[in-house]
Image: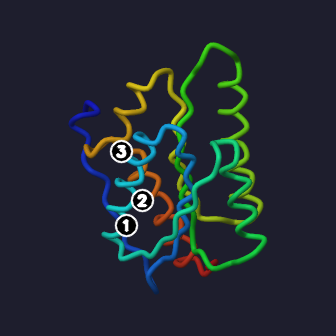
Amino acid sequence: MSTVDAPLPTAPAVPGAAPRLLMVRAPYYREVVDGMTQGALRILSEASATHETLDVAGAFELAQAIRLVLRGSQRFDGFIALGCIVRGETDHYDHICRESMAGLMQVALQYGLALGTGLLTVHDIGQAVARSGADGHNKGAEAASAALRQIAVARQMGAA
């Protein structure tokens, strides 16, 4: 199945009250992140989930922002991290990709978070645009669906 033919992600069923999520965005590549945001919002709407949005400076700050929010509040059932890192001419790309993804995983595991990650790590902007459009290959929609599935797992297993 090609990217164009991919089915649109759908919202999973989440037992209990409407899920509350925080969408943390690194909008350096605004068009791409806005496209992923629209995909995520479609999924959240299908699930009757509520959300807040927080923009941060860049991909490196995604995990840090989630941790800061946790320090001040436990009002979210899950989180969605959206951003885009495009390879440049230096090894900065490798470091930011690795550390950003590791930071997100670390905070999710350490705090037992339901986290959907839509952090694109691409070689060129065309690849990013292809993964943030309204078709079935929207990584924001996939990240929202993943976060909702994790919330459902936590609720089903009595961990929420």
Residue at 63 percent across and 52 percent down: it is 56
In terms of sequence position, does the residue under pointer 2 or pointer 1 come before the other? 1
Badge 3: residue crowd in 10 Å (few <14, some 14–19, many ≥20)? many
Residue at 26 percent across and 50 percent down: it is 8
Inter-mark Cα distance, 2 to 1: 7 Å
For label 1, the SS is loop
- The residue labelled by disc 1 is 12
Please tell me in which quadrant of the rendered image residue 77 appears.
bottom right
Amino acid carrying mark 3 in the image: Asn
Q: Name the disc covering residue 138, or none.
A: 3
Amino acid carrying mark 1 in the image: Pro
Badge 1: residue crowd in 10 Å (few <14, some 14–19, many ≥20)? some
Residue 2 drawn at (x, y percent): 26, 30
Residue 53 drawn at (x, y percent): 52, 64
Quadrant where the image shows the C terminus: bottom right
Amino acid carrying mark 2 in the image: Ser
Inter-mark Cα distance, 2 to 3: 11 Å
Residue 85 drawn at (x, y percent): 56, 32
Whether 144 is drawn above or below 137: the answer is below
Residue at 46 percent across and 22 percent down: it is 124
- The residue labelled by disc 2 is 145
